Image (tube, rainbow, N blue to C red):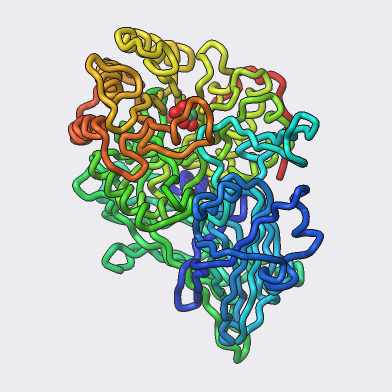
Amino acid sequence: MEQKFLFLLIQLICTRHVVGLLFPRESESRDMKDLSGRWKFRVDDSTDRNQSFREQWWEKPLHASGHVIDMPVPASYNDITQDSKIRDFVGWAWYETTFFAPASWKSSLAWLQVGSAHYNSIVWLNSIRVGDHSGGHLPFEFNVTNKLNYGATNRLTIAVNNTLTPTTLPPGTVNHYSKDQGYPDGYFTQKYDFDFFNYAGIHRPVKLYTTPHLRVSDIFTYTQTITQDPSVAAVNVFQVNITDAKDVASGAKSNAGYNITVVIKDAEGVTVANGTGQTGYLYVYFPKLWWPVGMSSEVGYLYTLEVYASAPSNGNAPAQIDVYRMPIGLRTIEVDETQLKINGKPFYFLGVGKHEDWDVRGKGFDWSMVVKDFNLLAWLGANSFRTSHYPYSEEIMQMCDERGIVVIDECPAVGMRSADNFVNETLLHHQQVVGEMVSRDRNHPSVVMWSVANEPLSSLPQAAGYFKTVLDYARSLDPSRPVTFVCNAHYDKDVATPYVDVVSINKYEGWYDDPGQLDVVEGRLKFYIDKWHQTRSKPIIHMEWGAGAIAGFHDNPSVMFTEDYLVDLMNRHFAVFDELRNDTDPFLIGEMIWNFADFNTAQGTNRVQGNKKGLFTRNRAPKWPAYVIRERYKELQKQNGTTRNRNSRREKHWERNYDVFQVQDAFEVLEL
Ligand code: BDP
């Protein structure tokens, strides 16, 4: 037993470390200020998009540079005004706000965290540049202790640039057009090969918070084992990092000689386990496990992990203790060659693909819309979703933990459809983004799998080495979860799925394939899924399927784009899913319809005011297909983990032996 846990600890210590950002929270040792609200805003629409830098707009209040308008934060700026130039703007957009920093903060460290801003950001505080960040869907933060005016007003300026290039994630291209051909001077367009509008701006809350100089800087915890007898224990491994500003300044090694105490409390606040040290494991006896909806009468049970960190007492100086509290769930995830199991029981995904997409606010975080969507997910009977095609706000992950909604967490590698995207520069950035996503979300019990990309050109020979590197990198950061990417390449052509733990396929039978041919849907779909299984022998999720259905369009017999057609198509898919689920040796582990709701896309000849594959309209009114899904999901939810046939194949433990596969054109493995 002891040897086993020693192994677990070694595994954790060997886990590659990335600096995570803890969600800003108040405690006895931490204050917080949310800077959400009405900011000042101006776009730099100069022909070369560089006037703002020539004129240094951050040096003075933004209105000194010219006309400014009101802009809500958080929100995408695109749909806020009546001006199509702002909706379609590409380049630097400037935001500014002012706030008061209390004098009492002077003895602490002060941090500025931006929940997310799309895509490149530069941040100035009182005209001083505090830092930059690349990438649109993850938080970033800066230490602003020495830049704040304490007991006074401060001016915060953030410039955000939404330009996408072949090496950003997602990628895009900028095309310039000639004046000789009748285009305006300097005219250019932004193109991208993904199917959602490239909303831009400050999308999630901007927060200021304080910590003591010695602070808890990162936490990683997960349940490694639940002992056979559930009355005995769940074993939770933890790793805490602390950072002492003193050590950072002097270059000394941190974490030496500090006191770290880790406590787990149940939902009533009763301590159920505690330990000390930077790394260790905690036994929780008679654990209440975290279960998703449909698998238990008590869903989403959360404990609180409390971490206390302090320096050794030093003469008369009072000990400064940092306290950080975080909800955690006790549960395990395993994958074998046919199933994904939660707490040892097979889980079947009854899910949806989603977007962070709402009218007016675009991708801006909005509690009304978030809570509404969770209520709709419950109404549908869905037990899961994928964060297609980028990490969602951490507040959404927290709600999934509480409501028992299982998440496949996806990074923004979508639209990698050209060889130009498979280069070392992208690979490095891809690792960076996976690192940010995993370190932000790895403590959420709802997250059961990482998806490192959606529909990349995985038939390219170089995709094998590329994805092996990215998938292995994700594993090196988090030994507790399986990894995948979502594949739309043909089973005969794809070269990257040998390296995933679960094969995730997108296939639009009866829509992009055999459009309008409902009668062939069942045969073709079954053939395709079986072929995938024969090719890879791994669990399979049907990650995207569906059809466009414009709300209120009907016909009989049904035709494409009517609600009726989607319902007919669904019933044919259900027949195949049920056949596979009831197989003597089932390997289909989920069905995720595309999409939860209609969403905005770039304008084009194949989209009518956006993508209409939603079960709900963009305003969240149900279409007929929503009722049909609800009937199925509610019924199947009752069976999850209880009635599926799972007895014939010898159950194997999750092992990763990838050496049998040949890696062609392997990339050099790049260290961050
Ligand atoms: C899939 C993409 C998804 C699209 C969907 C569609 O993964 O982003 O929105 O097709 O065309 O291929 O509706």
Count of picture labels:
0
Q: Residue furthest bottom?
A: 316
- Depth check, front residue: 170 or 358: 358
Q: Is residue 266 above or below residue 28?
A: above
Q: Position of residue 437 (x, y in %)?
A: 54, 47
Occupied quadrant, residue 412? top right
Q: Position of residue 643 (x, y in %)?
A: 20, 28
Q: Is residue 604 above or below residue 578?
A: below
- Please identify the quadrant where the C terminus is shown: top right
Residue drawn at x 67%, y 37% as measured from the top left: 189
Q: Position of residue 631 (x, y in %)?
A: 19, 32
Question: Relative to residue 8, is residue 148 drawn left or right?
Answer: right
Residue drawn at x 64%, y 17% as measured from the top left: 662
The answer to whether residue 279 of the structure is visible from this angle is: no
Q: Residue furthest front?
A: 182
- Depth check, front residue: 459 or 389: 389
- Depth check, front residue: 395 or 440: 395
Occupied quadrant, residue 577? top left
Residue drawn at x 53%, y 58% as measured from the top left: 115
Residue drawn at x 38%, y 58% as measured from the top left: 367
Q: Position of residue 141 (x, y in %)?
A: 61, 62
Q: Is residue 532 above or below residue 442?
A: above
The answer to whether residue 375 of the structure is visible from this angle is: yes
